[in-house]
Amino acid sequence: MTTANLKRQNFNVTPEEEAELNRLRETLAAPNIKEALLRATRVLLTLTQEIQEGRRLYSADRNGKETRLLLPDIEYTQGQVWTYLTSRPHSWKRQLYVKGRRLTAANVWYDMLANRMTLQEAAENWELPLEAIEEIVRYCETHRDLIAMEADEEKYFLQEKGVRLTLRSNA
């Protein structure tokens, strides 16, 4: 390849990012960071293609117990177009939000389940069109793994901050 066909890529990294890149290089036994990034990119593209073809990824422990691996960055929307839901920038949450509100789909769904609301009752309670509630339920039921993973992550963050979590009974 001639130098005329090469394009230089420059970007700034924090010391933490540099440490991550070096760990990646070591993990992949790459001779340099560029090669590590290229190898990691190939792996990610392969995983993305598998997920787009409808396959799911699993990990097995020494006893053969399988656990589904979640890759929310590449599987949370799966090309689905939503009318009432949208993504929002967040450091780790990947679930969708109700458009125009700072409200996750899971908040509405969990509220419906906890209070045994019908679709119509939820629409009235949240002042949303019935179609929005139907879309929220459809989204949450097809993304249960992601929503559960994020709920666990949120519990962990709260516990790390010293918040004591208790279960309340509806009795």
Image (cartoon, grey):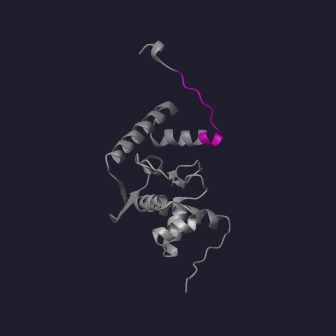
21 drawn magenta: no
Image position, residue 20 (x, y; %): 56, 43
Name the one closer to the observer, 147 or 69.
147
What range is drawn magenta here? Answer: 8-17
Image position, residue 48 (x, y; %): 39, 43
Looking at the picture, does residue 16 appear above or below residue 151? above
Image position, residue 39 (x, y; %): 43, 36
* Quarter containing the C terminus: bottom right
Image position, residue 40 (x, y; %): 44, 39
Residue shown at the point (48%, 18%) measured from the top left: 6
Residue shown at the point (45%, 16%) measured from the top left: 5
Name the one closer to the observer, 80 or 55.
80
Residue shown at the point (34%, 66%) measured from the top left: 63
* Quarter containing the N terminus: top left
12 drawn magenta: yes
Residue shown at the point (47%, 62%) measured from the top left: 130
| Most frequent secondary structure within the magenta stretch | loop
